[in-house]
Image (cartoon, grey):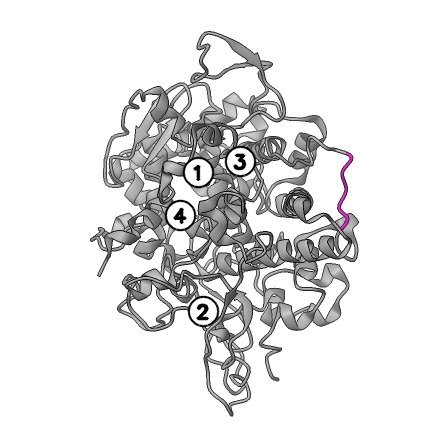
Amino acid sequence: MFRPAREPQSKRHVRNSYYVVGEGVFNDPGVGADEPVEPSKPSTIAALRKFRFSRLSPEPSTAVTSRPLRESLAAAMTPAGRTPDSDHPAIPAGFTYLGQFVDHDLTLDATARDLEQDVTVDELVQGRSPALDLDSLYGRGPRKPQDRKFYGPDGVRLRTGRTQASGGPGDGVNDVPQQELDGFDLPRAGIGSSIGERRAALIPDARNDENLAVAQIHCAFIRFHNRVVGDLAAKGTDSTALFDTARELVVKHYQWMLRTDYLIQIVDDRIVDDVFRHGRRYFDVSPRIKYEDDDAKDEYRTLQPGDTPTMPVEFSVAAFRLGHSMVREEYEWNRVFNSGQATGTLARATLRLIFVFSATSGNFLPFPPDDDNPDAGSSERLPTNWIADLPRLFDFSETGRKELMRPADQFNLAKRIDTVLVDVLKQLPLGSFGARGTTVPDIERNLAFRNLTRANMLKLATGQEMAEFFKLEDEDRLTPDEIEQGSGGASLTGLSAEDLEFVRTRTPLWFYILREAEVRGGGRLTGVGGRIVAEVFHRAMEGSRHSIVRDPEWRPSLGVNPSTFRMSDLLLYAFEDNPDLLNPLGPTPS
């Protein structure tokens, strides 16, 4: 039974309104609404208590998509059948969920926290911004009473979680999984009147327990912080400065990894290099900006690199939803859940099970039909046999550690970035969008439909309007025929003639950006999509309290080869250079 006590957690996961600076609050009328809403003008205090969005485009679009068009286009984007892996470029599947982890770092909304009276106006304006500062990992830090629960007894290290015993002896595969292991699950509440409450992750952002893959990445970042703390303490760092010193080191290495590894996996590296070498051209580049909620309402002030950024809706609602097309139907997860035929091997980890073995979307109960019941099942912690073999998700060949390299049949590539989503995503778990305890029409469980509808609600610019705003040369813009035909992506043959003409000439931005990657980008964002993502990442780093953009001489110092601090280097350092920690269940028996 759905319990009201869990409602704040659901609210944290789903944004019901968007405060767009200079326009007002766009309140969500519901996914099924056919027409976009008009923004309402908030009071000053109400505005301050909203996460701040903005537009890159000069003004809202007038190209409104009808519900039938959105339904048809969503159906075209989620066809039955398999979609191709990203063999060029060969993007490791872990980057799909690293992107989700980053998205939650960029869009944490402090106004929807439990007991929100402890959130001050000053924190909202100065501290809870779309900056790449890992606030989804740290919250507001151990000095804030409400966030102290995320930290261990020393108030410096982050809490870790312990898995729950699983499997049975004697089968050659499940001998190890029957043990409980520390540090391989998220910390969990452990108290409450229902099992769902006890199972809830004890982390600043419950969205990082939406699926098992992003949860395992969050666990890795907990380890990363804790190892940095241990190393600094061993070097004699003063205890009063230990947390702040560790956080700065962690954040800057994280930003370096995003700049030099993650971004070039998903965006045309020529665009990334241009933005980070020469600066932004379109986002927050005006020499003087007006802050609507300042006391001196008619005054402007010069934009400084450290000023609080906003979040462009074109990024949040369109461009950075690229990861939805990278999701696989199933994964070679570890030595227990894979496609091998060894004794004890069960099956590959399906996407449904990746959702199930989380507390926000699932309940650790692998058998239907109780997927959407938060209080079903008996496990309160992740079963040990579901710990990820991280070298199956990230490529460790670049570290030179041969024992961490997996053969092709045990390694997971992401799906190609294009206009097709795996068909499992047309039946999202209710918990993944905060709808547990409700009845939702099937079309409103379709992720593509939800994305298209959210964009319609905000009157998002079309792809053509953004190409014009960016002043792309004609040869760099998608033609109507390219939009219609694509290159192995969504087939638009099911659209009516009228809807097809609309999509050809007034293309929803999210679809346009994915079609760009498919047709022009070789599986990476380019043109409109590449420019949006690269510029927002640059601004989010610039606007962070600790910033490699504002400190351009900074270089990594951690790991075996810090000059190339990639995600694989981060993981190797976080897991103490120990292959047995990166894969505690061991290799798949031959």
For the N terminus, give its image quadrant: bottom left
State the SS at label 4: loop
Give the number of the mark in front: 2 or 3: 2
Seen from the viewer's position, the closer of residues 194 and 418 is 194
Q: Earlier in the sequence, mark 1 or mark 3?
A: 1
In this view, the mark in front (3 or 4): 3
Q: What residue is at 78 percent from the left and 54 percent from the top?
A: 235
Q: Is residue 9 above or below residue 573?
A: above
Q: Which residues are magenta?
A: 553-557
Q: CA distance from mark 1 to mark 3?
A: 9 Å
Mark 4 or mark 2: which comes first in sequence? 2
Q: Residue furthest top?
A: 298
Q: Which mark is residue 382?
A: 2
Mark 1 or mark 2: whose residue is earlier in sequence: 2
Say which residue label 1 marks: 510
Disc 2 element: loop
The dot on residue 529 is: 3
Residue neighbourhood size for the residue with mark 2, other residues' Cα within 10 Å, grouped as few (<14), some (14–19), many (≥20): many
The image position of residue 19, as x and y in percent, is 38, 28
Q: Main secondary structure of the magenta part?
A: loop
Q: In the image, which is nearer the foreground, mark 4 or mark 2?
A: 2
Identify residue for label 4.
491
Q: Nearer the viewer, residue 468 or 60?
A: 60
Mark 4 is surrounded, within 10 Å at the Cα level, by few (under 14), some (14 to 19) or many (20 or more) other residues, namely some
Q: Is residue 584 visible?
A: yes
At label 1, the amino acid type is Trp
